[in-house]
Image (tube, rainbow, N blue to C red):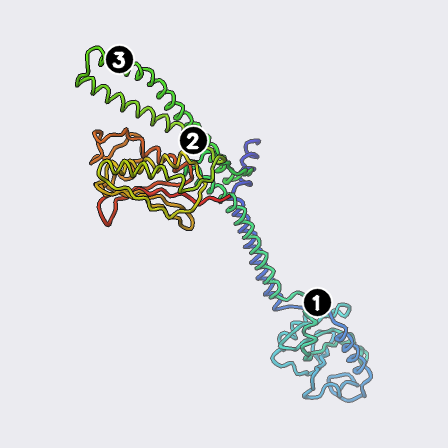
Amino acid sequence: MVAMVKRLSQFISSLFFKIFLSFWVILILTVGTALLIIQLSINTDHPLPNWARQELKQGAFMLHYAPPNNFPFLPPGIHNLFPPHPPTPSLILVSQSGEIVNTPRLGRNRRDILRFILSNDKQKNPKLRIVGPMRVVFGPQMVHLDGENYLLYIHRPINQERMDELSHFQMRPEMLLVMLVVFSLIACIMLAWHIATPLKKLRTSANQIAMGDLSVKLPNIHRRDEVGQLAESLLQMSTTLSNAITNQQRLLSDISHELRSPLTRLNMAVALSNKRYGSTKELKRIEREAERLEEMIRALLGLSRMQLDESKLELQNLTELLEELATDCQFEASQVGKTFILNNQGPQAIYCFPEALLSAVENLCRNAIKYANKTIELRIRHEATQLTFSVLDDGPGIPEDELKEIFRPFYRASEARDRDSGGVGLGLAIADWAVRQHGGRIEAKNRTTQTGLAVTIYLPNRGR
C-alpha cells in the first residue's frame, strides 16, 4: 500500500501528469465555453429593465380600460389595440392554455418569440430577450379581462442606447470568448514558463560544463518531476567529471614529479660519463632523449595545473600582453629564414587568465614557425560576440581526418609532423585546455586559398 501511494505521488508530481492535466483542463474549459456561448446566443434572457416593466403595466392598463367591442374571439375592450396590421410595438396576449388569442405581426422573429413565451410564463419573474437586430420581446404581465386571466407580452424595436444598457445585465458571448482566450493564454504561458525556465538554466550550465568550466554553480531546482531529476543527474555528472579531472591532474603531477628523480640521476650519470670517458655518439643520443623527456615532464606539469578559477580573471592590455611574445616569435622566425607577422585588430583590453592565454597563443605560434615554409601570421579580430586569435602558416597542412585529433595529448599527425621534427605532442593539448578554461573553443582548418594550416581560438566577449 505504501509503495502504491509512493508511485501515485511520483506520477502526480511528474511532468507528464502536469502537461496532461493542463491541456485537459484547457480543453474542457474551451469546449464548455463554446457550448455556453452557443446557449447564450440561442437563449439569452435578461432581467427586466425599468422601462420595459413600465410598458407592461401601461399595456395591461390600456387593455383593462379599452372600450367594449364584439370581437368574436377576444373579450370586450381590446379590439382597438389589435387591428389587422398593428403598429409597433406589438402586444401579444396569451391565454391560460398557452394559446395566442390575438394576431400580432411577429415577422421573421416569430420562432424566437414563441420560444421565449413558452419558456417564460411566470408573472413574478418577467424577462427580456433580444430576438433580432434592435428588437426585443419581454413579459409576462398578468391581465384580467372579462373574467379570464391572460399573460401579456410586448414585442417591439428599441434604440441603440437601450441595447447598450442590456449589455450591463449579462455578459455577452464575445466577452466570454475573450475571457477564455485570455485565460488559456495565461495558463499556457505559465505551463511553458514552468517547463522552459529551469530547462534554460540547465542548458546554460550544461554548455559551461561542456566548455570545461566544472566550477559552474548549477541552479537549485527543488522539484520532483523529470526536470528535477535531470538537474540531479547533471549535478552528479558535474561532480563525477570534476573528480575525474582532479584525479587525472593529480596523477599527471605525481607521475611528473616521480619521473624527475630518475631523470636527474640519468643526467648526472651522463655528465659523469662525459667527464670520465669523453663524449660519444651513444651518450649524445642519451642526452638528447633526456632533454626531450625533461620537456615532456615540464609540459605534463603545465597541463596538470591548467584548472583555473574564473573569479581570478584579470583585465589586461592586449598589446602589452602580446608584445614580448611577438618580439620572440619574430626573432625565432628570422633565425630560420621565415617571417612572423602580428596583425592586431582586437580590443584595447580584455578579461583573461594572462599566463594561460599567452601560453595557448605561444604554443600555436611556435608550432606554426616550426612547420611553415616562409610566413606565419597571428591575426586578432574583435567581432560582435567573440574575440578571435588566428595563427596561419604556409606549411604542408594536415589531413582532414586528423584536424580534430591534433588537440589530444601526445597525438602527432601522420604526415610532416613526426617525432624527428621535435616536440612531445602536448603543445596543442595545453592550448586547447587553456582556451576551454576561458569558455572558448579552438579549431584547426586547412587554408583554402593556399597551402598551410589555420588554427583559430574563439573567445567570448567578457564584461564586468
Disc on the earlier residue, 1 or 3 = 1
Q: Quadrant of residue 79?
A: bottom right
Kind of residue indicated by mark 2: Gln
- How far apart in space, not on screen, are marks 3 and 2 (Cα)? 36 Å
Q: Which residue is mark 2?
A: 307
Q: Are marks 2 and 1 in contact (CB under 8 Å)?
A: no
Q: Is residue 177 above or below residue 451?
A: below
Q: Nearer the viewer, mark 2 or mark 1?
A: 2
Q: Residue at x 67, y 77 (%)?
A: 160
- x, y percent for residue 270: 25, 15
Picture quadrant of residue 212:
top left
Query: Which numbered disc flags the more N-terminal residue, 3 or 2?
Result: 3
Instruction: Answer left or right for 311 relative to 290.
Output: right
Residue 299 appears at what percent x and percent y? Answer: 33, 27
Report the mark closest to the observer, 3 or 2.
3
Per the model, the C-alpha gap separating discs 2 and 1 is 72 Å
* Residue assigned mark 1: 169
Q: Is residue 133 left or right of residue 443?
A: right
Q: SS for tag 2?
A: loop
Q: Amino acid at mark 3?
A: Ala
Residue bearing mark 3? 269
Q: Is residue 227 above or below residue 34?
A: above
Q: Residue at x 18, y 17 (%)?
A: 282
Residue 109 or residue 314, whichever sits in front: 314
Q: Position of residue 250 (x, y in %)?
A: 40, 23
Q: Given the current orientation, which residue lies at the most extreme top position?
A: 276
Q: Quadrant of the N terminus?
A: top right
- Disc 3 element: helix
- Residue at image point 20% right, 20% down: 285
Q: Amino acid at mark 1?
A: Phe
